[in-house]
Amino acid sequence: MTQIEEPLRWLPESPKRGATHASHGLAREGQPRIDHERATHAQGATRLPGPPLWLLLELTYRCPLHCVFCYNPTELARISEELTTADWIRVLREARALGAVQLGLSGGEPLARDDLEQIVAEAHALGFYTNLITSGVGLTEQRIAALKKAGLDHIQLSFQDSTREMNDFLSSTRTFELKSKVAALIRQHDYPMVLNVVLHRLNIDHVGEILDMAERMGAQYVELANTQYYGWAWLNRDRLMPTRAQLERAEETTRRFRERVGGRMRVFFVVPDYFETRPKACMNGLGSVFLTVAPDGLALPCHAARMLPGLELPNVRDSSVADIWYRSRAFERFRGDAWMKEPCRSCPQKTRDFGGCRCQAYLLTGDPDNADPVCDLSPHHDLVVAAVARAEAAGHAPPASTDQPAAAKPPIERPLIFRDHRTSIPLSSG
Amino acid sequence: MNEVSTDARPRVGKGFRLQWEPAQDAHVLLYPEGMVKLNRTAAAILSRCDGRRTVVEIVSDLETTYGATGLEKDVVAFMSTALSRNWLEIGG
């Protein structure tokens, strides 16, 4: 939490409410960036947490793309019954009444819902700041005009499909034309042009070309976000993780690009957390500011939390948002620090990183109460070190060039698993 | 940092929205995927930045409203900070 360097105060403040400041600029995809007076549950169990300031609606898992790094659940074939328009609108009203203020509309591809404009209009009327997170597939002139009219505040255009699309992109073929067209529409409708590109071993050597393309497209903000390993990305982790050398080259290229373009474009580079020694403050602590509602109505304290064992996740079909946020066991589960094990529990860092990511702790160690093994104080940190070492060993294949698509030269034998309904079926049992 | 001149007519920056949030008992400034929670002083200044009034007029209004004098230097300093963060824009 950053205090605004507030030069004057002639008005008294309400107790414990100073001016607080959100962290800069863009969010990594789906990650909340609202910073606020942190929910008070850390200090006393009897006090209510703050409101769910950030509401993310994953309107559908349907998506025209097949990204290997998608964080959506691999069992999405099993999740078919989507909420109705009326359900979503009820969720918006209830969450707004609690104080939710930032709204992310995501998926899947949210444009696959033909009621997106209706949902945006309702959200806008309620006072949400509305953010659309889209691949741009399906964003026609007609739809963007309707979304603008409905009050949509912001569009983040993502590069989603890793290998096929990236190769298209780098060779300026169909996808680039589609994205450029969408980018032009976004600018015409007076939105800032914000581009999100997910990086991994197969495209990270092209960061220079990616940034040049983004510049030609008129992007004002570019987020280069390294893959986070959940869902489909977890299945493909060993194929997607870059080597340290790749990462350093990409950062250097980004630094030089920033120097060249100056203030015309802002470029954010999100390092993959496996290369760090302290974990990310995932969701600012589960149940603190962030609420996701999945296409089937499941309410999640983070968009990957469906995987966590024994959480008994509530559903907006049968509980109110207030009951879910303030009274459900699932949202209470990771509040405060009583759930923590050592070394987190007695660690001074716990107020800053909240023990890191619960899903990562579960995926790597089998126990969601463990410290995120990204932390080098975790007794399981060797698992992360080993994963990075495997990436190093597999990364000896020569860097891909634009005329030799990276996808055509898999550095190791195991095939990439593309996010797909059909592939999902065998992953949906159990 | 650019100093704001006293005849400028600042307004809330494009892509930013200032609104009152009862749940937070505060004004907030919303922007893509983020939020700044404002203290009352900051809110009093920003809510007067409508692109029509000059800095001089805003200072005078603030001094009248809050029964204070000599606020100009502080208000200009705050506006300069706000300008550098794109909370405010000038011109057009």
Image: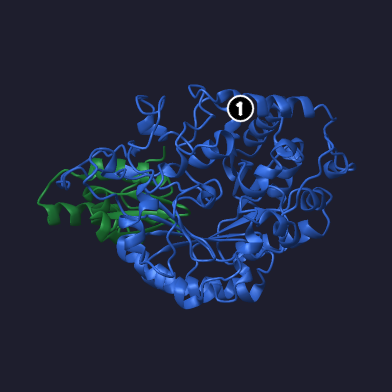
Chain colours: A blue, B green
Residue placed most toward the observer, A52 or B92: A52
Q: Position of residue A251 (x, y in %)?
A: 65, 31
Which residue: 88% across, 43% down? A408
Q: Where is residue A246 in the image (x, y as percent from the top left)?
A: 72, 29
Q: Where is residue A315 in the image (x, y as percent from the top left)?
A: 44, 64
Q: Is residue A6 visible?
A: yes
Q: Can residue B56 be seen in this view?
A: no
Which residue: 49% across, 45% down? A25
Residue placed most toward the observer, B49 or B35: B35
Q: Which amino acid does label 1 sit on?
A: Leu
For residue A132, above or below residue A389: below
Q: Mark 1 lies on which chain?
A: A
- Quadrant location of residue A244? top right
Q: How many labels does the image show?
A: 1
Residue placed most toward the observer, A22 or A100: A100
Residue placed most toward the observer, B16 or B13: B16
In this view, the residue farthest toward the left is B67
Q: Is residue A371 left or right of residue A428?
A: left
Q: Is residue A119 left or right of residue B56?
A: right
Q: Position of residue A152 (x, y in %)?
A: 50, 67
Give the residue pinned by disc 1.
A383
Which residue: 29% across, 51% down? A50
Quadrant location of the N terminus of chain B? Answer: top left
- Quadrant location of residue A409? top right
For residue A8, above or below residue A156: above
